[in-house]
Image (tube, rainbow, N blue to C red):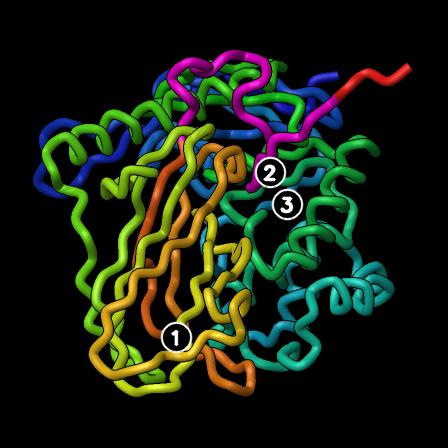
Amino acid sequence: MDVIQVSDISKSFSPPGEQHPFWALNNISFSLKQGDLLAIIGKNGSGKSTLLKILSEIYKPTSGKALIKGRVASVLDFGTGFHPDLTGRENIFFYGALTGFKHSELVSKFDEILDFSGLAAFIDTPLRNYSNGMFVRLAVSVILSLRYDVLILDEVIGAGDSEFRLKMSERLKSFSENGTTILIASHNMNELFNCNAVLWLEAGRMKRFGYDKNTLVEYMEETIGAYRQNLAAKESGNQVSIAKMGITYGGFKLNELWLSDKGQNPKSMFAYDEDIFLQVKATTLQPGASFPFQFGVFDSMSNLLFGTSYQLFNPDFKTKQVGDEISFTALFPKSLFNLGSYFINLYGLHDDGRFKDLGKNVAAFTIIAAEKTAFAPRGSFMPGVIRPFINWQITQ
């Protein structure tokens, strides 16, 4: 049974002073069945948010129509469906009433919503004082604690800490299995691999729609392919430089930092099957000092993957004299990172184990498919952040 039917929807905007309208959407048509979990993908400006606002009845289409059966809930821009002057507690009842729930139903679900959100300390604070992340947690907790027929989510599945994202992912999967139709727009491909349908928008037009996860792979191929071309052009023009740091901390001056291949050539783009070397040059400022720098490696969604420091693995290292320039090299082995973009933050390590932020995004790199194993529908992109080589064997 079709729960959502979108027929030839187009949407135009007329910017002030412009004679010709801007078409954010052009003739979009698709349908979804009960329990479908749809991933909506595309670059910024492709029309994802405009489509979701039309389905949420925030925008009216310029032409075409959308029919949705059942009770609908959406989490879009900050504050959509919620009132900034009301507290978190009041907004739970306000939003629930707007979407058709009785007061008694909301009372019975209140403790579950509060527990899911983790916002008990702020529940009687006006919404205008919430951060965007806090608002998303509240809104998501409301709609995932009540029973809706259709859920519409725009860039919210990455909200909150890892525990909250896990709860959200499990609840969405459970809802879909029990008949709720869910539409999710996101740039995080790892979060979309639970979806059974994919809509790919490009410049307001529907490039692809269907029940085939290979569409996610093909989108990653095109996206990473663009990274590859742009980065290759920069590197061929010697635009990848060694970062001059000049950071003084804990008896050292950090002079230079860069990522390289095994030939120590500065790079920012590496094939999946290529070793990556973090190169650091520092000058000692006092004798007997330990190397105090720690490096945190993050994915494109700002999730910390791991931290590493020379001193943690070599606790007996001490400087001998002032003025020595020492080079440190860390090896990130091939077949560790999945395809995508990553960055490194710099920290100072105290003797008592505490950290001090010394630099954001001091180095960044992109992992692409190896040239000899270019993207293919199977075996290229895989869910997850890391992608270690696992040796499988058949045993009798």
Label located before the other in sequence (1 or 3) = 3
Q: Residue at x 69, y 65 (%)?
A: 117
Identity of the residue drawn at 55% across and 81% down: 353
Q: Amino acid at mark 1?
A: Asp
Query: Which label number is shown at residue 384?
Result: 2
Q: SS for tag 2?
A: loop
Residue 8, label in figure: none
In the rendering, at what x and y percent does residue 280 appear?
30, 60
Question: On the rendered structure, is 19 left or right of 102?
Answer: left
> Where residue 146 sits: x, y (%)?
77, 51
Image location (x, y in percent) of residue 17: 8, 40
Locate the N terminus and report the quarter of the image it occupies. Answer: top right
Please tell me which residue lies in front, 190 or 135.
190
Structural distance between the alpha carbons of marks 3 and 2? 29 Å
Task: Tell which of 323 and 178 is nearer to you.
Answer: 323
Side of 29 relative to 222 (left or right): right
Residue placed under numbered mark 1 in the picture = 357
Q: Which residue is mark 3?
A: 73
Secondary structure under tag 3 reads strand
Q: State which region is magenta.
A: 368-392
